[in-house]
Image (cartoon, grey):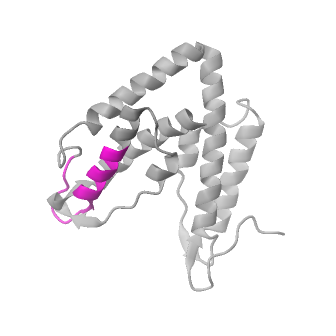
Amino acid sequence: MSETFPRAGRLSKGYDVDQVESFLGRARAAYEENGRGPAMTSWHVRTVGFDLVRGGYDVDAVDAALDRIEDAFARREKQRGEERSGSQAWQTQLRTQEQSLRAQLGRPDGERFPRGSGMELTYDIDAVDELCIRIEESFAMGHPLPPDAVRLAVFKSRRGSRGYREASVDAFLDRVVELLVVQTV
């Protein structure tokens, strides 16, 4: 049996092969059934997670494939949204979604997200704010960032109130990617 992706090094960790293959099978079935099979959206692809195991699939290769699969589902969602509501209404819905995001992006530096507490791991405030400023500027100029500019963002870790809560930032950036994907497909 041929492998779908290259493997991580012998001593390196990669994504669990069985989990990846199972998810890809479900995604393929959902896409090929064109809405008549198992329900799956670009969100399901964007938020899937796999265990890390020695000798698993190379993380970068799988992540790149997932980005392409997410884009394919997003194109279909956009097409269906335009068919269902009309192109004008779909664009209005996207502008409304963008305005909702811009409200949070427009908050002052250091106040965009809740701070952590105790010893919990958090994201570096300056790095998150810098990305938020880039996103806001791109919306203001009418030239949205490529989704990978947000998907691939990495932030330094902090502890407690010295950083933003990871879950809050991740959930917000997920909404940004969702919008960017449908704007750019």
Which quarter of the picture shows residue 77?
top right
Q: Magenta residues, as a range?
A: 114-134
| Whether residue 140 is situated above or below residue 80 in the rendered picture | below
Q: Residue furthest front?
A: 141
Which quarter of the picture shows residue 5?
bottom right
Percent position of residue 167, x then y: 33, 51
Magenta-span inclusion, residue 132: yes
Residue 40: tell me if it is visible: no
Percent position of residue 55, x then y: 63, 78
Percent position of residue 108, x then y: 17, 42
Choose between 119 and 148: the one closer to the eye: 148
Residue for point 75% across, 43% down = 29
Residue for point 42% across, 57% down = 153
Residue 82: tell me if it is visible: yes
Percent position of residue 133, x then y: 30, 45
Magenta-span inclusion, residue 30: no
Q: In the rendered view, does 1 fall on the left or right side of 71? A: right
Q: In the rendered view, does 91 fall on the left or right side of 69? A: left
| Whether residue 184 is situated above or below residue 49 in the rendered picture | above
Choose between 37 and 92: the one closer to the eye: 92
Residue for point 59% across, 37% down = 41
Residue for point 40% across, 29% down = 98
Q: Residue furthest bottom?
A: 11
* Picture quarter with the N terminus: bottom right
